[in-house]
């Protein structure tokens, strides 16, 4: 009869799962068990701590609704989402703009807007022109690419926090030279949703829970992989300690007062290619 020990239990479990037919599932599950067991051994996990962990994950599950994905928020705040994105970028299928988090505030069915349209229904502060080009990795301009953008208001809230109406978001198409052009307002950084178990974790860790000001982009064109990215505003105080680890140096852009490249002079502008 086999005698289980705190050391041999890992191999015993992996052996029993070795009949998994899908090789990738077999590989992923074996690695998961190995790391999970190593983790328990490393911290000498007690039964009380184990049940506390189970209760925490149960609360995370209970907080999920069709409109709220607390598990993704947990993954984001543990840096796992950022790591998966970084691994994906490293495959170098496309040496393109770095990816960044999609986040929970993306919405489907956002209307197409004509070039130069303002995405904020009632701009309070300065209107900002946003422009740039979409190209493939050889630098060839992509005409007819869809550029979907979404961001917060000037006081750091997404439209869904005000109600159903679509605001501060739009979908634009690049012109024959691959250029897009729109107007927006300056977004503000914000707290991620902290009213669930992930918020409890963030407070227990004495983290601030904020994201730096950013504008999300989802860019697509027939025959190309979709790019989910964002630009982050230069000068924001949380560029270095984004609670979800999405802000990256390559994605920082500046609002310029008078850029000679701005297609709509007289406004401040941001260029993001
Ligand atoms: C966002 O940028 O919209 C976001 C990303 C991850 C977690 C929460 C919000
Ligand atoms: Fe966001």
Image (cartoon, grey):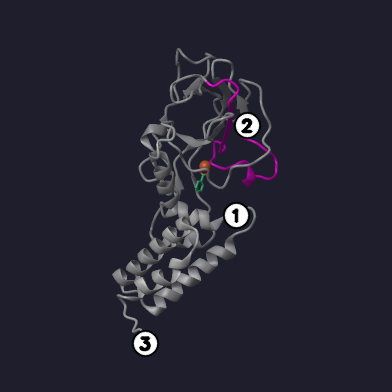
Residue pointed to by mark 2:
170
- Which label's residue is closer to the chain start, 3 or 1? 3
* Separation (CA) of disc 1 from disc 2: 22 Å
Q: Residue at x 53, y 63 (%)?
A: 60
In reply to whether residue 155 is colored magenta, the answer given is: yes
Mark 1 residue element: loop
Q: In the rendering, which numbered label is found on residue 239?
A: none
- Which label's residue is closer to the chain start, 1 or 2? 1
* Separation (CA) of disc 2 from disc 3: 65 Å
Q: In the rendering, which numbered label is found on residue 1?
A: 3
Crowding near pointer 2: few (<14 within 10 Å), some, many (20+)?
many
Crowding near pointer 3: few (<14 within 10 Å), some, many (20+)?
few
Residue pointed to by mark 1:
68
Contact, CB < 8 Å: mark 2 with mark 3? no
Residue 259 horizontal/vertical position (percent):
45, 16
Q: Quadrant of residue 40?
A: bottom left
| Quadrant in which the N terminus appears | bottom left
């Amino acid at each position: 009869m086999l005698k289980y020990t705190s050391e041999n239990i890992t191999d015993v479990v992996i052996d029993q799962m070795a009949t998994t037919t899908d090789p990738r599932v077999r590989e992923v599950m074996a690695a998961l068990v190995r790391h999970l067991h190593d983790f328990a051994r490393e911290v000498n996990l007690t039964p009380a701590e184990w049940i506390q962990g189970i209760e925490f994950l149960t609360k995370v599950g209970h907080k999920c609704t069709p409109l709220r994905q607390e598990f993704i928020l947990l993954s984001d705040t543990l840096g796992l989402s950022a790591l998966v994105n970084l691994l994906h970028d490293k495959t170098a299928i496309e040496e393109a703009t770095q990816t960044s988090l999609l986040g929970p505030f993306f919405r489907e069915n956002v209307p197409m807007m004509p070039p130069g349209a303002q995405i904020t229904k009632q701009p309070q502060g300065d209107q900002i022109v946003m422009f740039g080009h979409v190209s493939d990795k050889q630098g060839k301009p992509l005409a007819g690419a869809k550029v979907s953008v979404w961001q917060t208001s000037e006081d750091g809230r997404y439209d869904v926090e005000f109600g159903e109406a679509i605001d501060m978001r739009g979908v634009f198409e690049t012109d024959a030279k691959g250029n897009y052009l729109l107007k927006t307002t300056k977004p503000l950084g914000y707290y991620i949703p902290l009213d669930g178990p992930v918020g409890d974790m963030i407070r227990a860790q004495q983290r601030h829970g904020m994201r730096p000001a950013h504008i999300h982009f989802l860019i697509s064109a027939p025959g190309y992989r979709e790019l989910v990215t964002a630009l982050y505003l230069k000068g924001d105080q949380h560029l270095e300690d984004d609670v979800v680890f999405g802000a990256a140096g390559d994605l920082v852009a500046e609002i310029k007062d008078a850029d000679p490249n701005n297609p709509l002079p007289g406004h401040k502008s941001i260029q993001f290619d």
